[in-house]
Amino acid sequence: MESSRVWYGRELLALAKEDPTIVALDADLSRSTMSTFIEQELPRQFFEIGIAEQNMVGIAAGLALNGMKPFVNSFAVFLTGRAYDQIRQVIAYPALNVKLVGSSAGLSDFGDGATHQSIEDISLMRTLPNMAVISPADHVQTKAITNYLARFQGPAYLRISRADTEQIFPDDYRFVLGKVDLLLQGDDLAIISTGTLTATALKAARRMEAQGIKAAVINVSTIKPLDKNDLLKSIGGNRRVITIEEHSIYGGLGSTVAEILIQEKAGYHLKIMGIRDLFGQSGESHQELLNHYQLTEEDLITAATALLSD
Amino acid sequence: MQIEEKLREKAKELRRAIFMMIGANCVGHFGGSLSVAEIMTVLYFHQMKYDPQNPGLKGRDRLILSKGHSAPAQYAAMALAGFFPREELSSLKKLGSRLQGHPNLLSLPGIEANTGSLGQGLSMAVGMALAERLQKEKGRFYVILGDGELQEGQVWEAAMAAANFGLHTITAIVDHNKLQATGPICQRMNIGELRSKWEAFGWHVIEVNGHSIPELIQAFNAAEQNLKGPTVVIAHTVKGKGVSFMESVAKYHNGLVDENQFQQAMAELQ
């Protein structure tokens, strides 16, 4: 198990060593977001903004307007929610080269409860023109995406979990914006997942395989701009599709996939799994919350079985 | 002094351009555009170093109109300064125009920041000034804020940050016309005493008559010489300045001017 946020922080530091225009900003959470690596080793390329996310986003816009490549760090919930208007008005609208990195996404900040759990950030960022929205599934992908974003011109939102994850992607994985990852072939149904739940989807699919059910597993890290044709190609002949994400069922991966499939007139049966119009709450572990909100392997197998008997 | 006389004439020309741009029988942000006319004039035609033929020039001075609704005043100044042809002013707020209702840097070269959602300009200046410090550039940053805009909390976050980072290249100008869209600020949401607020946030404060060209010039020069931290120029102004029926009348924040009023205004601004 590895920590995506640590891999993000290390990669950002490595990139900043090579490129003096890369700077990190944080709002008093650098030891959680892991911008602390850059803070400690390259203090000139780090700005502590204090507990002021709105100001931080505006400052990032100013830095980008003067040719810097700012990475803005905070918890996903504060960055995308508290500073939504700033992100809209001065980052997305002028299409500035600012990377917004939302940490502790989903339910991964289990103990702190609803105030700190971000289950609507994908929805908020996805609706903004010019904004890329990216949700990695493991530490390898997180590292690759961080590297990609350092060269990507324009605004992007990167969603990082606080939870440790199992390695899914090979060490030499290369990220391509918009492309999906077909991780497992299968022609009974397709499971489309993002973030931490891709590992869950893979485990569920392997268990189903033992029961004679062949599920394709497709990881979608680029929620936007998503290559529709690549997604449809990966779904292939499957007409039963389940999406699963650590996010509200409104506006996230499930909505993204639904918007695509419903316009295909191909008769897809779709089940969207996520957090059902509820706030999070405190729990003693991330897994306990995933159990409570019915986002486990067992829940996925139950949903798949129900969908197949439709 | 000849220069002052020239700038006074320029400010008049700028006010006329604001009227021509918005036009008769149209709604526009007259009040706050007229109150910043001298501030705009002094910045664009005396104080700032820039090249209208090369708006992206490195190390240039920059104006961020944080009170973006006063865009007509900035567009007028930019047209008079040669950023774009004067004829283009009449395209204000028309579909596809570079002159959006609020400034958009993607459409109009020379606009330094997208503003309109109030309270955000000073933060962007802080970012620009931090970048220039790293890049060892020497540009200065002028941020025009409305006094009503000071009700936005982000302004004070940015004020704190500018002082914290010792950004002496930033000069904020508060267009203190005492009126917001719906009435007198002291009655709608009193912003209280400004000098002590800015001083408490670590800023050097200069108060001027915002329609006095020599006072503005002197204040901007003093700000440039202050190397300790950021300076704010609290410019006492009159909303709707220069047009008798608009002066200190809140409804012309964004108001309609009919044909007769338009003619009267143009006559008064000759």
Image (cartoon, coloured by chain):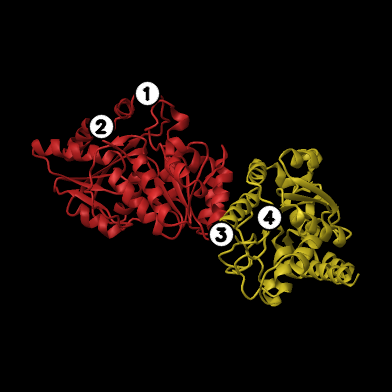
Q: Is tag 2's residue or tag 1's residue first in the polypeptide sequence?
A: 1
Chain of the residue under label 2:
A
Judge if badges 1 and 3 mark residues of a common chain. Answer: no
SS type, badge 2? loop
Instruction: Mark yes or no: residue B23 visible.
Output: no
Q: Mark 3, chain letter?
A: B
Residue B84 horizontal/vertical position (percent): 66, 75
The mark that comes first in sequence, 3 or 4, is: 3
Give the labeled residue for mark 4.
B169
Q: Colour of chain A?
A: red
Q: Residue furthest top?
A: A284
Query: Residues under labels 2 and 1: Cα distance?
Result: 16 Å
The quadrant where residue B209 appears: bottom right
In the picture provided, is B218 more to the left or to the right than B168? right
Provide the secondary structure element on which disc 4 rests: loop
Q: Which residue is mark 3?
A: B135
- Rendered hue of chain B is yellow
